[in-house]
Image (cartoon, rainbow, N blue to C red):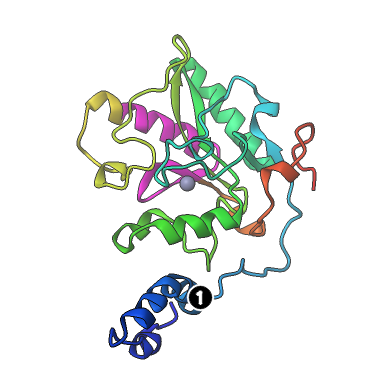
Amino acid sequence: MIECAELRRQRPGANSRRVHAGWLAVWPALLAGACAPALRPTVETGKRAPDLVEIVTLDPSIHLDIRYATAHNFVGRPVYKEARAFLQRPAAEALVRAHRALAAQGYGLVVFDGYRPWSVTKLFWEVTPEDKKEFVADPRQGSRHNRGCAVDLSLYELATGREVEMPSGYDEMTERAYPDYAGGPVEARARRALLRAAMEAEGFTVYSSEWWHYDYKDWAQYPILDVPFSSLSRAHGAGF
Ligand SMILES: [Zn+2]
């Protein structure tokens, strides 16, 4: 972070009610412009060409519950205009294999989020309190979601179509979100373990703070992207 102390020292006092009120009005904008680091996606070279695929085009029986396209998320308002989910093609194909393997146990995958444009990661960072920053990616490094190689997901029951109970809700910023959290219903922990085994068998690794977040093994080979969903072709996925 850029240190803002210098600006704070220059902040005018309340010796003039009129001037003070004026400063109060512009202060938030000044802080935003002057104190925020000049955040840009990291420029990277030598990466693989993006090949984002819309997950449901590979297997429409994978369910979507795109919370960021609704107000039912930790921001409290929609941050996506479209309820869609994409991954880089090898990750998407691995996800489909995990989904199909889970069918033998009576479950399917429900996806909360996949590829996430970098500007949304920046927004998440800005709205998250300091003591909860372990749950969001620093935009200066970018997120594996920005590379199209991370997916947030849970299980649904094939018999009912209903999303299962897990040890915590999605995006719950508490210790219950940790993949090794030992509390909660034993059945919920068993489902969490089932999801993890299916994902690890296909090259995904769970994030140490979130049972629902998985990174695909090739994430480092892909660049950080800031392409909106609306620019991604519905027919072919990778339409940019
Ligand atoms: Zn995630």
Q: Quadrant of the N terminus?
A: bottom left
Horizontal arrangement in the rendering, residue 29 relative to residue 89 (left or right)? left
Horizontal arrangement in the rendering, residue 148 relative to residue 214 (left or right)? right
Locate residue 180, reporting x and y percent: 29, 43
Residue 125 visible at all: yes
Q: Is residue 208 magenta?
A: yes
In this view, 164 is above or below 118: above
Locate residue 138, reporting x and y percent: 47, 63
Locate residue 64, reporting x and y percent: 55, 28
* Disc 1: which residue: 37
> Most extreme residue toward the top, as rendered?
159
Locate residue 40, reporting x and y percent: 60, 69
Q: Residue at x 41, y 77 (%)?
A: 22
Q: Examine the image and state in which quarter residue 49 appears.
A: bottom right
Horizontal arrangement in the rendering, residue 218 relative to residue 67 (left or right)? right
Q: Residue at x 70, y 27 (%)?
A: 57
Report helix, strand or loop for mark 1. loop
Report the front residue among 24 and 125. Answer: 24
Q: Residue at x 36, y 86 (%)?
A: 11
